[in-house]
Image: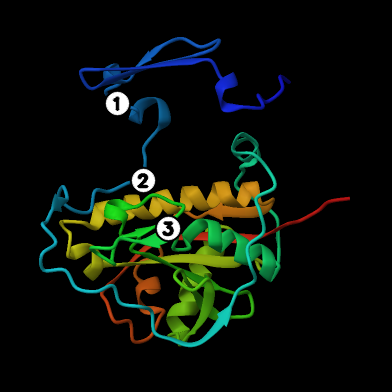
């Protein structure tokens, strides 16, 4: 097995843009013209993906309303995040869809949440736009991270405070969501990660935004998987958005929700 390069510039590549085409040449590989690829369905099989809306249209945002918080009943400050102990390249190499989970310690969960979704700064002219470690459409970050613990407790990550907020939930809907996740991949000791996105927030800036919101959540889940790998945690994205049950889990939501993703997170099980 060849060693991983220590630095990104050890990868020899050439990148060129010309008339909308991207030509990429990596060492020991042939050049691929992205413009010549017309279909990936045949070599990869059928993708279970449905375009749920028309193409998104950017609005001027003049009629925007303020971002509304989740209705939490108690807040618990999280521990300060630890530093990430590995490089980005090693995180890429270590990323796997985990098959074994043990309960995640609060310190590890706090660090993972911080590097996934904590607010680093807010736009001075529009406080709805935030800077976080992950990219998002229009800097809006509409997806809320909801956590379902193995003991049945549900909480939300409060990005601006680095804290967890306890939620009042619809017990039947919460059981349905966890049962759906267990059906996709069983893990009794993992914490369920559920994404609930704010349709009203995005609707201030985009029309026909459903597909855009699903792509935004996918970026967050991909980012979350890499952060988990860098921290040595077990993470697995599940093949469901959680709809419709997830949209009914949190009681008294102040905005119109859209279920946009499910995943498991835990500590990696050590085998001896």
CA separation, marks 2 and 1?
A: 15 Å
Q: Nearer the viewer, residue 191 or 80?
A: 80
Q: CA distance from mark 2 to mark 3?
A: 10 Å
Residue at (26, 23) in percent of width and height: 38
Give how far apart the Cα atoms at labels 3 and 1 are: 24 Å
Q: Would you call the spot at circle 1 few (<14 residues within 10 Å), some (14-19), or many (20 or more)?
A: few
Mark 2 or mark 1: whose residue is earlier in sequence: 1
Q: Residues within 10 Å of mark 3 (few under 14, many from 20)?
A: some
Residue that label 3 marks: 240
Q: Secondary structure at mark 3?
A: loop
SS at circle 2: loop
Residue 4 to residue 65: above or below? above
Local SS, label 1 = loop
Name which quarter of the figure residue 247 lies in.
bottom left
To which quarter of the image does residue 67 belong?
bottom left
Q: Which residue is mark 2?
A: 48
CA neighbours of label 2 inside 10 A, class few (<14), some (14 to 19), many (20+): few
Q: Can see residue 186?
A: no
Which residue is identified by label 1?
39
The percent coordinates of residue 96 (x first, y second) are 62, 43
Q: Colour mode?
A: rainbow
Residue 231 in view, yes or no: yes
Of labels 2 and 3, earlier in sequence is 2
Residue beneath the point at 40% across and 61% down: 121
The location of residue 152, given as percent across then percent down, is 58, 81
């Amino acid at each position: 097995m060849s060693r991983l390069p220590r630095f990104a510039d050890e990868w020899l590549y050439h990148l060129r843009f010309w008339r909308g085409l991207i030509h990429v040449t990596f060492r020991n590989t042939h050049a691929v013209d992205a413009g010549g690829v017309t279909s990936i369905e045949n070599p990869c099989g059928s993708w279970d993906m449905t375009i749920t809306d028309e193409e998104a249209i950017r609005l001027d945002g003049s009629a925007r309303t303020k971002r509304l918080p989740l209705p939490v009943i108690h807040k618990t400050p999280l521990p300060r995040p630890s530093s990430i102990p590995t490089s980005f390249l090693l995180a890429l190499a270590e990323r796997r869809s985990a098959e074994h989970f043990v309960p995640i310690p609060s310190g590890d969960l706090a660090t993972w949440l911080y590097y996934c979704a904590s607010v680093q700064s807010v736009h001075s002219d529009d406080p709805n736009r935030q800077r976080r470690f992950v990219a998002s459409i229009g800097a809006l970050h509409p997806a809320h991270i909801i956590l379902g613990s193995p003991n049945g407790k549900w909480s939300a990550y409060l990005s601006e405070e680095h804290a967890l907020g306890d939620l009042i939930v619809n017990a039947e809907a919460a059981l349905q969501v966890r049962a759906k996740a267990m059906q996709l991949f069983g893990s009794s000791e993992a914490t369920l990660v559920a994404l609930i996105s704010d349709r009203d927030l995005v609707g201030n800036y985009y029309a026909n935004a459903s597909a855009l919101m699903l792509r935004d959540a996918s970026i967050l889940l991909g980012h979350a998987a890499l952060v988990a790998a860098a921290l040595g945690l077990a993470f697995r994205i599940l093949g469901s958005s959680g709809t419709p049950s997830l949209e009914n889990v949190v009681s008294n939501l102040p905005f119109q929700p859209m279920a946009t993703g499910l995943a498991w997170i835990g500590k990696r099980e050590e085998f001896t």
